[in-house]
Amino acid sequence: PRTAILISGRGSNMVSLLKAAEDPAYPASFVLAASNRPEAPGLVHAASAGLATLALDHRAFPDRAAFDAALDAGLRAHGIDLVVLAGFMRVLTPGFVEAWAGRMVNIHPSLLPLFRGTHTHAQALAAGVRLHGCTVHFVVPELDAGPIIAQAAVPVRPDDDEDSLAARVLAQEHRLYPAAVALVASGGARLDGDRVVFAAEAV
Ligand code: GRF
């Protein structure tokens, strides 16, 4: 599938996806990087890797619906089949999410359904959990609530602070996301209503 990566910032998850796709057998073809922040450093990297780039400054749009309409048009103009959110820090409208249902995935830095929203590593430290991690899920209108495709766990160490924990989780994100996107791109995991069907259990 022709795949777009949506970012807002540094784009380290995007870099890990592009690296995985250097293998000719990788099932997703990354053709477009889009950002709601024109200054996102990740866009420069994407362009140098040969992707088309789309910078849509959300501040230039009157409301979320107008921004999402422009994003939707951009994705369609590039013939996109699959949308991968990678540190994309913008809430998408239900209309947009429904238009891309089953064709849009996100990575979230916690073991969902724990710790939705932002500052997930601080949330984990405050809760005193001994395991933390990251989750790849299909995107549904409710934030960080979509059906789960894959997860990776890391230990929380007694001397951890937000930064040390974030770094340990990020290393797993970089491993997990390319694998999970490959699973979706190859049809090995697909959304069926409100659950994920994995190829191994398909009849
Ligand atoms: C990642 O931890 C991602 O899970 C979160 O924001 C961070 C983005 O990092 N939502 P990067 O832009 O991919 O480097």
Image: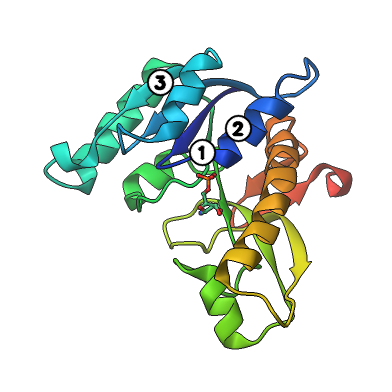
The answer to whether the beta carbon of the residue marked 3 is less than 8 Å from any atom of ligand 1 is: no
The three-letter code of the residue at mark 3 reads: Thr
Measured from the top left, where is residue 169 in percent x and y?
67, 59
How far from the left and from the top, in percent, is residue 164?
A: 64, 65
Mark 2 C-beta to ligand 1 under 8 Å: yes
Q: How much space separates mark 1 and mark 3, taking CA atoms?
A: 13 Å
Looking at the image, the residue that sits furthest to the front is 159
Q: Which residue sits furthest left?
A: 62
Q: Residues within 10 Å of mark 1 (few under 14, many from 20)?
A: many
Q: Is residue 32 visible?
A: no
Residue ID for mark 3: 53
Instruction: In the rendered view, tell whether residue 128 sits above or below residue 55.
Output: below
Q: In which quarter of the image is the C terminus?
A: top right
The residue singled out by tag 1 in the image is: 11
Residue 153 figure quarter: bottom right
Regarding mark 2 in the picture, which secondary structure is present there? helix
Q: Earlier in the sequence, mark 3 or mark 2?
A: 2
Q: Which SS class for mark 3?
A: strand
Residue 139 visible, this angle? yes
Where is residue 115 drawn, in percent x and y?
54, 73
Residue contact between numbered discs 2 and 1, judged by CB atoms under 8 Å: yes
| Residue position marked by numbered label 2 in the rendering | 15
| Observer-nearest of 106 and 51 | 51
- The image shows a total of numbered marks equal to 3
Residue 136 placement, left or right of 130: left
> Does the numbered disc 1 mark a residue whose Cβ is under 8 Å from ligand 1?
yes
- The amino acid type of the residue labelled 1 equals Gly
Left or right of 123? Residue 88 is left
Residue 85 against residue 154 in the figure, above or below: above
Q: Which of marks 1 and 3 is in front?
A: 1
